[in-house]
Image (cartoon, grey):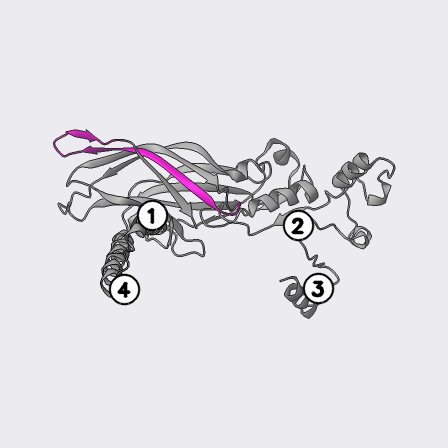
Amino acid sequence: MAKHARKVVEANGVDHVVTVIQGAVEDVTIPVEDWEAFHLQTEEGAAAAEECPSDDDDASISCKQQQSKVVDIIISEWMGYFLLRESMLDSVIRARDMFLKPKSGILLPSHATMLIAPIMNEDHHMVIEEYLEGMDDWNDYLVNAKKQYGVDMSILTEEYDKEQRDYYLKSSHYVQLDGDTILAPPSVVKTLDLAVCTLEDAKGVDETEFSFDIESSGGGAEDDEEINGFAGWFTVDFQSRTDEVGKQFGAKMTNPVHFSSSPEIGDTHWGQQAFYFASAIPIQSNGKVKIDGTMEMIRSKENARLYNVKLQYTIGAIAADGLNNVMDMVESVYKIP
Protein backbone atom coordinates (compact mmCIF):
# COMPACT_ATOMS: atom_id res chain seq x y z
CA MET A 1 0.00 0.00 0.00
CA ALA A 2 2.81 2.44 0.83
CA LYS A 3 4.41 1.80 -2.58
CA HIS A 4 1.14 2.60 -4.35
CA ALA A 5 0.65 5.68 -2.17
CA ARG A 6 4.09 7.03 -3.14
CA LYS A 7 3.27 6.57 -6.84
CA VAL A 8 -0.01 8.44 -6.45
CA VAL A 9 1.68 11.23 -4.49
CA GLU A 10 4.38 11.66 -7.13
CA ALA A 11 1.95 11.40 -10.05
CA ASN A 12 -0.11 14.24 -8.57
CA GLY A 13 2.88 16.48 -7.90
CA VAL A 14 2.50 16.68 -4.12
CA ASP A 15 5.60 14.74 -3.09
CA HIS A 16 7.07 17.98 -1.75
CA VAL A 17 4.16 18.16 0.73
CA VAL A 18 3.25 14.53 1.44
CA THR A 19 5.68 12.09 3.05
CA VAL A 20 4.72 8.40 3.01
CA ILE A 21 6.19 6.56 5.99
CA GLN A 22 5.99 2.79 5.68
CA GLY A 23 5.66 0.63 8.79
CA ALA A 24 3.48 -0.19 11.77
CA VAL A 25 2.41 3.02 13.48
CA GLU A 26 3.79 1.69 16.75
CA ASP A 27 7.26 1.51 15.19
CA VAL A 28 7.59 4.52 12.90
CA THR A 29 9.14 7.88 13.72
CA ILE A 30 8.80 11.24 12.01
CA PRO A 31 11.89 11.73 9.78
CA VAL A 32 14.33 14.29 11.19
CA GLU A 33 14.37 16.25 7.92
CA ASP A 34 10.61 16.82 8.20
CA TRP A 35 11.03 18.74 11.44
CA GLU A 36 12.65 21.63 9.59
CA ALA A 37 10.90 21.17 6.24
CA PHE A 38 7.43 21.40 7.78
CA HIS A 39 8.35 23.58 10.77
CA LEU A 40 7.10 20.93 13.20
CA GLN A 41 6.64 22.02 16.79
CA THR A 42 4.99 20.63 19.89
CA GLU A 43 2.42 22.69 21.74
CA GLU A 44 5.20 23.69 24.14
CA GLY A 45 7.30 25.01 21.27
CA ALA A 46 9.94 22.24 21.14
CA ALA A 47 11.25 21.89 17.61
CA ALA A 48 14.12 19.40 17.64
CA ALA A 49 14.44 15.90 19.05
CA GLU A 50 18.22 16.43 19.35
CA GLU A 51 17.64 18.55 22.48
CA CYS A 52 16.75 15.46 24.54
CA PRO A 53 19.33 14.30 27.12
CA SER A 54 21.49 11.34 26.16
CA ASP A 55 22.92 10.40 29.55
CA ASP A 56 19.62 9.15 31.01
CA ASP A 57 17.81 6.51 28.94
CA ASP A 58 14.44 6.89 30.68
CA ALA A 59 14.56 10.67 30.50
CA SER A 60 15.61 10.53 26.86
CA ILE A 61 12.71 8.22 25.93
CA SER A 62 10.24 10.39 27.80
CA CYS A 63 11.60 13.51 26.14
CA LYS A 64 11.41 12.04 22.66
CA GLN A 65 7.85 10.87 23.28
CA GLN A 66 6.85 14.37 24.32
CA GLN A 67 8.66 15.95 21.38
CA SER A 68 7.02 13.58 18.89
CA LYS A 69 3.60 15.08 19.66
CA VAL A 70 3.59 17.48 16.72
CA VAL A 71 0.64 16.13 14.71
CA ASP A 72 -2.48 18.29 14.32
CA ILE A 73 -4.83 15.70 12.78
CA ILE A 74 -4.93 11.88 12.67
CA ILE A 75 -7.34 10.41 10.11
CA SER A 76 -7.86 6.66 10.22
CA GLU A 77 -10.45 4.26 8.86
CA TRP A 78 -10.04 1.73 11.69
CA MET A 79 -13.62 0.55 12.09
CA GLY A 80 -14.36 -3.17 11.78
CA TYR A 81 -17.57 -5.18 11.83
CA PHE A 82 -19.66 -4.05 14.82
CA LEU A 83 -16.99 -1.36 15.21
CA LEU A 84 -14.33 -3.24 17.19
CA ARG A 85 -13.65 -6.42 15.21
CA GLU A 86 -10.04 -6.56 13.96
CA SER A 87 -8.86 -4.50 16.96
CA MET A 88 -7.37 -1.74 14.82
CA LEU A 89 -8.47 0.88 17.35
CA ASP A 90 -5.50 -0.15 19.49
CA SER A 91 -3.07 1.21 16.91
CA VAL A 92 -5.01 4.48 16.60
CA ILE A 93 -4.84 5.03 20.35
CA ARG A 94 -1.11 4.33 20.36
CA ALA A 95 -0.60 6.72 17.44
CA ARG A 96 -2.61 9.38 19.27
CA ASP A 97 -0.56 9.00 22.44
CA MET A 98 2.70 9.10 20.50
CA PHE A 99 2.11 11.79 17.87
CA LEU A 100 -1.03 13.89 18.41
CA LYS A 101 -0.88 17.29 20.09
CA PRO A 102 -2.68 16.53 23.36
CA LYS A 103 -4.49 19.85 23.76
CA SER A 104 -5.39 20.86 20.22
CA GLY A 105 -4.96 17.73 18.09
CA ILE A 106 -7.99 16.14 16.43
CA LEU A 107 -8.77 12.50 15.63
CA LEU A 108 -11.13 11.74 12.75
CA PRO A 109 -13.50 10.09 13.26
CA SER A 110 -13.74 11.74 16.66
CA HIS A 111 -16.51 9.73 18.34
CA ALA A 112 -18.05 6.28 17.91
CA THR A 113 -21.18 4.53 19.17
CA MET A 114 -22.24 0.86 19.19
CA LEU A 115 -25.91 -0.13 19.08
CA ILE A 116 -28.06 -3.26 19.10
CA ALA A 117 -31.74 -3.92 18.37
CA PRO A 118 -34.07 -6.92 17.96
CA ILE A 119 -34.79 -7.97 14.38
CA MET A 120 -37.07 -10.06 12.22
CA ASN A 121 -35.03 -11.25 9.24
CA GLU A 122 -35.99 -13.96 6.77
CA ASP A 123 -32.36 -15.07 6.50
CA HIS A 124 -32.76 -16.60 9.97
CA HIS A 125 -34.84 -19.42 8.49
CA MET A 126 -32.17 -20.05 5.84
CA VAL A 127 -29.49 -20.32 8.53
CA ILE A 128 -31.58 -22.85 10.52
CA GLU A 129 -32.34 -24.81 7.35
CA GLU A 130 -28.66 -24.95 6.39
CA TYR A 131 -27.80 -26.25 9.84
CA LEU A 132 -30.51 -28.94 9.63
CA GLU A 133 -29.51 -29.88 6.09
CA GLY A 134 -25.92 -30.26 7.24
CA MET A 135 -27.01 -32.67 9.96
CA ASP A 136 -29.20 -34.58 7.47
CA ASP A 137 -26.19 -34.93 5.14
CA TRP A 138 -24.14 -36.23 8.06
CA ASN A 139 -26.77 -38.84 8.94
CA ASP A 140 -26.86 -39.98 5.31
CA TYR A 141 -23.09 -40.28 5.40
CA LEU A 142 -23.26 -42.44 8.53
CA VAL A 143 -25.68 -44.82 6.82
CA ASN A 144 -23.58 -45.07 3.66
CA ALA A 145 -20.30 -45.52 5.54
CA LYS A 146 -21.79 -48.37 7.55
CA LYS A 147 -23.50 -49.97 4.57
CA GLN A 148 -20.68 -49.73 2.01
CA TYR A 149 -17.58 -50.01 4.19
CA GLY A 150 -18.77 -51.49 7.45
CA VAL A 151 -17.39 -48.47 9.34
CA ASP A 152 -19.36 -46.92 12.20
CA MET A 153 -18.61 -43.18 12.26
CA SER A 154 -21.37 -42.24 14.69
CA ILE A 155 -18.83 -41.66 17.46
CA LEU A 156 -18.09 -38.32 15.73
CA THR A 157 -21.72 -37.13 15.58
CA GLU A 158 -21.52 -35.02 18.72
CA GLU A 159 -18.37 -33.25 17.54
CA TYR A 160 -19.80 -32.71 14.05
CA ASP A 161 -23.00 -31.28 15.51
CA LYS A 162 -20.97 -28.90 17.73
CA GLU A 163 -18.98 -27.74 14.71
CA GLN A 164 -22.19 -27.03 12.78
CA ARG A 165 -23.81 -25.27 15.73
CA ASP A 166 -20.73 -23.14 16.29
CA TYR A 167 -20.80 -22.03 12.66
CA TYR A 168 -24.52 -21.54 12.09
CA LEU A 169 -26.01 -20.85 15.52
CA LYS A 170 -23.16 -19.62 17.73
CA SER A 171 -21.46 -17.23 15.33
CA SER A 172 -22.70 -13.85 14.22
CA HIS A 173 -23.56 -13.38 10.55
CA TYR A 174 -22.70 -10.49 8.24
CA VAL A 175 -25.96 -9.06 6.92
CA GLN A 176 -27.26 -6.04 5.03
CA LEU A 177 -30.64 -5.48 6.65
CA ASP A 178 -33.53 -3.30 5.53
CA GLY A 179 -34.84 -0.67 7.92
CA ASP A 180 -38.15 -2.51 8.40
CA THR A 181 -36.39 -5.52 9.93
CA ILE A 182 -35.68 -3.50 13.11
CA LEU A 183 -38.45 -4.17 15.63
CA ALA A 184 -37.64 -1.58 18.31
CA PRO A 185 -35.52 1.54 18.76
CA PRO A 186 -31.85 0.51 19.17
CA SER A 187 -30.05 0.51 22.49
CA VAL A 188 -26.62 2.11 22.85
CA VAL A 189 -24.14 -0.37 24.37
CA LYS A 190 -20.91 1.64 24.10
CA THR A 191 -19.67 5.12 23.25
CA LEU A 192 -16.10 6.16 22.56
CA ASP A 193 -14.50 9.59 22.61
CA LEU A 194 -11.39 9.02 20.53
CA ALA A 195 -9.59 11.95 22.14
CA VAL A 196 -9.52 10.29 25.56
CA CYS A 197 -10.47 6.59 25.24
CA THR A 198 -7.91 4.03 26.40
CA LEU A 199 -6.57 0.66 25.30
CA GLU A 200 -8.73 -0.82 28.04
CA ASP A 201 -11.81 0.72 26.39
CA ALA A 202 -10.85 -0.94 23.10
CA LYS A 203 -10.88 -4.40 24.65
CA GLY A 204 -14.65 -4.67 24.29
CA VAL A 205 -17.95 -3.78 25.90
CA ASP A 206 -18.53 -4.09 29.63
CA GLU A 207 -21.76 -5.75 30.68
CA THR A 208 -24.41 -3.26 29.55
CA GLU A 209 -28.15 -3.40 30.08
CA PHE A 210 -30.80 -3.17 27.37
CA SER A 211 -34.59 -3.31 27.29
CA PHE A 212 -36.87 -3.69 24.26
CA ASP A 213 -40.64 -3.58 23.88
CA ILE A 214 -41.76 -5.21 20.64
CA GLU A 215 -45.40 -4.89 19.69
CA SER A 216 -47.39 -6.83 17.14
CA SER A 217 -48.20 -4.89 14.01
CA GLY A 218 -51.85 -5.72 14.70
CA GLY A 219 -52.35 -7.21 11.26
CA GLY A 220 -53.58 -10.53 12.61
CA ALA A 221 -50.83 -12.52 10.88
CA GLU A 222 -49.35 -13.88 14.09
CA ASP A 223 -47.70 -16.83 12.33
CA ASP A 224 -45.55 -14.40 10.36
CA GLU A 225 -44.47 -12.13 13.20
CA GLU A 226 -41.49 -13.19 15.23
CA ILE A 227 -38.24 -12.02 16.75
CA ASN A 228 -35.35 -14.11 15.48
CA GLY A 229 -32.28 -12.33 16.80
CA PHE A 230 -30.41 -9.13 17.53
CA ALA A 231 -28.44 -6.97 15.13
CA GLY A 232 -25.43 -4.84 16.02
CA TRP A 233 -24.01 -1.86 14.15
CA PHE A 234 -22.18 1.41 14.79
CA THR A 235 -22.07 5.12 14.06
CA VAL A 236 -19.10 7.48 13.92
CA ASP A 237 -18.93 11.26 14.05
CA PHE A 238 -16.45 13.75 12.62
CA GLN A 239 -16.79 16.73 14.94
CA SER A 240 -15.00 19.04 17.35
CA ARG A 241 -13.51 17.65 20.53
CA THR A 242 -15.88 17.34 23.49
CA ASP A 243 -13.40 16.58 26.28
CA GLU A 244 -12.69 19.47 28.64
CA VAL A 245 -9.16 20.17 27.34
CA GLY A 246 -10.17 19.77 23.71
CA LYS A 247 -13.17 22.07 24.05
CA GLN A 248 -10.82 24.80 25.23
CA PHE A 249 -7.89 24.36 22.85
CA GLY A 250 -9.05 22.15 19.97
CA ALA A 251 -9.94 23.41 16.51
CA LYS A 252 -13.66 23.92 15.90
CA MET A 253 -15.24 21.92 13.08
CA THR A 254 -17.98 24.04 11.56
CA ASN A 255 -19.40 21.26 9.35
CA PRO A 256 -19.57 18.08 11.46
CA VAL A 257 -20.37 14.80 9.68
CA HIS A 258 -22.31 11.80 11.00
CA PHE A 259 -21.90 8.32 9.49
CA SER A 260 -24.04 5.30 10.35
CA SER A 261 -24.05 1.63 9.34
CA SER A 262 -27.66 1.33 10.53
CA PRO A 263 -30.08 -0.74 8.40
CA GLU A 264 -32.15 2.42 7.94
CA ILE A 265 -29.26 4.05 6.02
CA GLY A 266 -28.90 1.35 3.38
CA ASP A 267 -26.01 -0.92 2.41
CA THR A 268 -22.52 -0.09 3.66
CA HIS A 269 -19.20 -1.90 3.60
CA TRP A 270 -19.67 -2.85 7.26
CA GLY A 271 -23.30 -3.96 7.13
CA GLN A 272 -24.53 -5.33 10.43
CA GLN A 273 -23.78 -8.35 12.58
CA ALA A 274 -26.80 -10.59 13.20
CA PHE A 275 -26.93 -12.70 16.36
CA TYR A 276 -29.63 -15.23 15.54
CA PHE A 277 -31.68 -17.14 18.11
CA ALA A 278 -31.72 -20.93 17.94
CA SER A 279 -35.53 -20.64 17.99
CA ALA A 280 -37.51 -17.58 16.96
CA ILE A 281 -39.77 -15.83 19.48
CA PRO A 282 -43.34 -15.53 18.14
CA ILE A 283 -45.31 -12.32 18.61
CA GLN A 284 -49.00 -12.99 19.21
CA SER A 285 -51.49 -10.92 17.28
CA ASN A 286 -52.12 -7.64 19.14
CA GLY A 287 -49.65 -8.78 21.79
CA LYS A 288 -46.26 -7.57 22.94
CA VAL A 289 -42.90 -9.10 23.78
CA LYS A 290 -40.55 -7.52 26.30
CA ILE A 291 -36.85 -8.44 26.29
CA ASP A 292 -34.65 -7.31 29.17
CA GLY A 293 -31.02 -8.27 29.43
CA THR A 294 -27.35 -7.46 29.11
CA MET A 295 -24.70 -7.56 26.41
CA GLU A 296 -20.98 -8.04 26.91
CA MET A 297 -18.27 -8.09 24.24
CA ILE A 298 -14.94 -9.70 25.07
CA ARG A 299 -11.76 -9.98 23.04
CA SER A 300 -11.00 -13.56 22.03
CA LYS A 301 -8.16 -15.25 23.93
CA GLU A 302 -7.20 -17.22 20.80
CA ASN A 303 -7.08 -14.25 18.43
CA ALA A 304 -6.75 -10.67 19.70
CA ARG A 305 -8.35 -9.33 16.52
CA LEU A 306 -11.63 -11.18 17.13
CA TYR A 307 -14.37 -10.85 19.75
CA ASN A 308 -17.05 -12.90 21.46
CA VAL A 309 -20.45 -11.43 22.34
CA LYS A 310 -22.34 -12.67 25.39
CA LEU A 311 -26.08 -12.00 25.56
CA GLN A 312 -28.20 -12.71 28.63
CA TYR A 313 -31.89 -11.86 28.61
CA THR A 314 -35.40 -12.75 29.77
CA ILE A 315 -38.41 -12.77 27.48
CA GLY A 316 -41.83 -11.67 28.61
CA ALA A 317 -44.80 -12.31 26.31
CA ILE A 318 -47.84 -10.13 26.96
CA ALA A 319 -50.97 -11.40 25.19
CA ALA A 320 -53.80 -9.24 23.92
CA ASP A 321 -55.86 -10.29 26.96
CA GLY A 322 -53.17 -8.94 29.28
CA LEU A 323 -51.80 -12.30 30.45
CA ASN A 324 -48.04 -12.17 31.03
CA ASN A 325 -45.75 -15.13 30.45
CA VAL A 326 -42.10 -14.66 31.49
CA MET A 327 -39.63 -17.24 30.21
CA ASP A 328 -36.41 -18.37 31.88
CA MET A 329 -33.13 -16.48 31.41
CA VAL A 330 -31.46 -17.16 28.07
CA GLU A 331 -27.66 -17.03 27.78
CA SER A 332 -25.86 -17.21 24.45
CA VAL A 333 -22.27 -16.60 23.43
CA TYR A 334 -21.49 -15.77 19.80
CA LYS A 335 -18.18 -15.55 18.00
CA ILE A 336 -17.72 -12.67 15.57
CA PRO A 337 -15.76 -14.46 12.83
Name the kind of residue labelled 2 in the image.
Val
Which label's residue is closer to the chain start, 3 or 2? 3
For disc 2, the neighbor class at 10 Å (few under 14, some 14 to 19, many from 20) is some
Q: Quick check: 259 left or right of 178?
A: right
User: Which residue occupies 69% across, 42% down?
Assistant: 98
Residue 14, labelled with which disc?
3
Instruction: Point out the residue furthest to the bottom here.
Output: 11
Question: Residue tagged by mark 4?
Answer: 149
Which label's residue is closer to the chain start, 4 or 3? 3
Q: Is residue 200 above or below residue 275?
A: above
Name the kind of residue labelled 1 in the image.
Lys
Q: Is residue 142 above or below residue 239?
A: below
Q: CA distance from mark 4 to mark 3?
A: 70 Å
Q: Is residue 104 magenta?
A: no
For disc 4, the neighbor class at 10 Å (few under 14, some 14 to 19, many from 20) is few
**Depth check: 299 or 207 in front?**
299
Q: CA distance from mark 2 to mark 4?
A: 57 Å
Question: Residue tagged by mark 2?
Answer: 25
Can the viewer see residue 319 in this picture? yes
